[in-house]
Image (cartoon, rainbow, N blue to C red):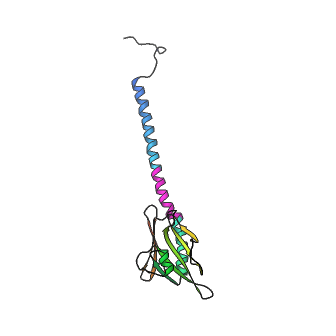
Amino acid sequence: MRILPNKLRRGFTILELTVAMMVGMTVGATILAMLNQQVAFLKIFKAQSFLNEEAPIISNHISKLLLGAERFRLHATVEDALAGANPRLTDSPVCVLNFRQPDGSVRAGILSFEDRGQGDALYYYLVPLTGTLVAPEWAITTMPTLVTFSVESGIIRTRLTGPAGEELTFSGAMQ
């Protein structure tokens, strides 16, 4: 057996190639595991962003509306709410709120969870003194997948189901 001088030997041995491939595969597997962990973290962060960012704003708006109301009534649709027809005591997507004005008159507003062609959203309507209801004043939120209003022991409860299935309940009583 003749050993070639270093100058004539070219390439890598099988052992060297095996070690290099193992190192490369280990680095690749580590990067893939870190990527999967980052994707999972982003999903959790997105779910938490609803609870941390959107829910406090929704709570603030709904609490102010509910606590300022003198009376409330639940309905299945905005049309029923405007007509004063078919009031309900069970979970409902529409809540009519009556507010006493400084001059003693009463003004109505409507909270409604509905799809107006752009996906489900929680809207606030101010019922006009004359004419017909055309469009909501503003959309409170578009993130929940479900919003229901109910009455339990004289207290109105608003239940929101968030995009990740989390449930929030806001409660309020009449003035």
Q: Within the magenta stretch, is there residue 149?
A: no
Q: Pick whichever, 24 or 89, lies toward us.
A: 89
Asked if the magenta segment contains residue 46, the reply would be yes
Horizontal and vertical percent position of residue 107: 57, 82
Q: Position of residue 164 (x, y in %)?
A: 44, 61
The answer to whether one can see residue 160 in this image is: no
The residue positioned farthest toward the right in the image shown: 103
Q: Does residue 100 appear left or right of residue 11 in this picture?
A: right
Query: In this view of the protein, which residue sits in the foreground, 6 or 26?
Result: 26
Magenta segment, prevailing SS (helix, strand or loop) = helix
Q: Which part of the image, by quadrant, shows the N terminus?
A: top left
Residue 84 located left or right of residue 2: right
State the residue at coordinates (44%, 47%). Answer: 36
The outermost residue toward the top is 2
- In-image side of 90 versus 62 (left or right): left
- Decide which of 161, 113 is in the foreground and name it: 113
Task: Examine the rendering and report whether any part of residue 15 can be seen.
Answer: yes
Q: Which residues are magenta?
A: 39-53
User: Disc count in the image?
Assistant: 0
Name, please, the residue furthest toward the front: 131
